[in-house]
Image (cartoon, rainbow, N blue to C red):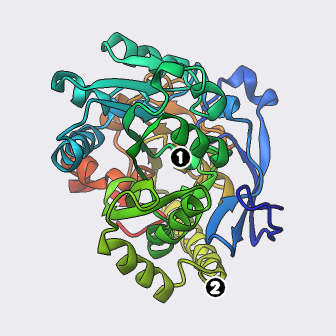
């Protein structure tokens, strides 16, 4: 195994075994054609980068059938509204244009439409890109990389801000991404992006963050080291609550902006907690193995009492839990979800049926396995009636 940035040799420290595409919700007729790969993780000591050994091709993960829409979550709508306000407040004085990487259905960019700011989205998944276009947002249905952005010569060195949210960790060729940033950004332009945070994953033992789309799990230390290699520097880092713990990063060209004290503060924290070194990986491995054993024991006890368990929310993260822990239809009757693109299909790998929320409401289970634990506040508020009689479980502390 070699680091995708430095090309140094690194040893995988953990295998999750045979794993399907996390968002590959599947029809019964396609069970025999389902794609699997070996999900292994390694760590680059040079740049403190947690990464997958191998992964499916990008167009296998992001295509015309991508089942996630940002606008389906009230929590994400609110977060993106606040994110856009933060950008306008801190960097909006001379903001004329903004490009968003992995713009999905345009939920984030929609917040800039009435501010006389030209916005463009890069979104590789055709179905969600079409939703964005219908909202009147200019959306380019391509992956963001140097090969694609260099075709837009009129934008060269013209862009004030390039943004992203839970998208950069999906891109295997970060060198091409950063070359694309360099091509488009003004001399004092900014790259502002949010990603699931490695430190939060360690703290919560949320190993479900590890799946095919999350090729990298970033820390402040790794982002600082990566961008320094290419003439950029990290000038701010702000913790976020999204995705069970994320980090907002602000990057500029070297010596163009003042570096906020947050950067040094969080790097000191990461050293103390071993987030920036291999010792943290080993501790995390021990913790999530214990977490698996604890979860399986909990499910076994419930089934011995003839409790009916259903999954709540057919998330991409649930694919890792179900397949790594070998939890199938004998334990979970079905998974309920609101996304029409998933209903009627089956979960990747374990082929648990995905049903509408009506099944959950009309015949409530004894126990709901909350796969969307990172949206628990929103969900618990919505499901107060179920909570009065039913119980919730998850692989993390709720």
- Residue at left offset 81%, top offset 71%: 11
Asked if 8 appears above or below 192 in the picture, the reply is below
Instruction: Report the quarter where the C terminus lies.
Output: bottom left
Name the residue that disc number 1 marks. Answer: 168
Residue 286 placement, left or right of 304: right
Residue 359 placement, left or right of 377: right
Give the number of the mark in front: 2 or 1.
Answer: 1
Q: Position of residue 206 (x, y in %)?
A: 50, 65
Mark closest to the chain's N terminus, 2 or 1:
1
The residue tagged with tag 1: helix, strand or loop? Answer: helix
- Residue at left offset 24%, top offset 40%: 84
Q: Nearer the viewer, residue 193 or 350?
A: 193
Q: Which of 377 and 8 is in front in this view?
A: 8
Callout 1: 10 Å neighbours few (<14), some, many (20+)?
many
Name the residue that disc number 2 marks. Answer: 279
Q: Can residue 245 be seen from the camera position used here?
A: no
Callout 2: 10 Å neighbours few (<14), some, many (20+)?
few
Residue 343 placement, left or right of 322: left
Query: Of the numbered discs in the image, which one, if any, rests on residue 384?
Result: none
Mark 2 to mark 1 CA distance (whole Å): 25 Å
């Amino acid at each position: 195994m070699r680091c995708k940035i430095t090309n140094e040799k690194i040893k995988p420290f953990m295998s999750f075994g045979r794993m399907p595409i996390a968002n590959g919700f599947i029809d019964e007729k396609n069970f025999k054609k389902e794609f699997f790969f070996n999900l292994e993780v390694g760590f680059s000591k040079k740049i403190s980068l947690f990464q997958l050994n191998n992964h499916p091709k990008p167009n296998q993960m992001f295509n015309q059938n991508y089942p996630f829409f940002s606008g389906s979550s009230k929590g994400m709508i609110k977060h993106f509204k606040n994110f856009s306000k933060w950008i306008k407040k801190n960097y909006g004085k001379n903001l004329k244009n903004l490009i968003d990487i992995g713009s999905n259905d345009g939920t984030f960019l929609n917040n800039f439409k009435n501010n006389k700011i030209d916005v463009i989205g890069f979104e590789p998944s055709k179905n969600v890109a079409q939703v964005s276009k219908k909202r009147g947002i200019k959306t380019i249905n391509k992956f963001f990389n140097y090969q694609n952005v260099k075709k837009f010569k009129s934008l060269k060195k013209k862009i004030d801000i390039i943004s992203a949210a839970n998208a950069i960790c999906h891109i295997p060729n970060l060198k091409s991404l950063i070359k694309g940033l360099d091509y488009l950004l003004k001399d004092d332009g900014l790259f502002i992006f949010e990603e699931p945070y490695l430190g939060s994953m360690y703290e919560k033992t949320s190993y479900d963050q590890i799946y095919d789309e999350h090729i990298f799990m970033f820390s402040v230390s790794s982002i600082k080291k990566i961008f320094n290699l290419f003439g950029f520097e990290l000038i701010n880092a702000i913790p976020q609550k999204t995705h069970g713990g994320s980090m907002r990063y602000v990057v500029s060209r070297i010596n163009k902006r003042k570096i906020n004290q947050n950067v040094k503060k969080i790097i000191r924290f990461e050293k103390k907690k071993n987030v920036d070194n291999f010792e943290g990986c080993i501790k995390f491995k021990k913790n999530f193995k214990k977490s698996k054993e604890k979860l399986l024991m909990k499910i076994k006890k419930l089934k011995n009492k003839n409790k009916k368990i259903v999954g709540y929310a057919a998330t991409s993260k649930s694919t890792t839990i179900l397949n790594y822990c070998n939890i199938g239809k004998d334990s979970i009757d079905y998974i309920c979800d609101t996304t029409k693109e998933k209903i009627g299909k089956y979960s990747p790998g374990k082929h648990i049926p995905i049903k509408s929320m009506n099944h959950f409401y009309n015949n409530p289970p004894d126990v709901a396995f909350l796969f969307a634990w990172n949206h628990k506040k929103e969900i618990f508020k919505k499901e107060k009636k179920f909570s009065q009689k039913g119980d919730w479980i998850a692989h993390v502390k709720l």
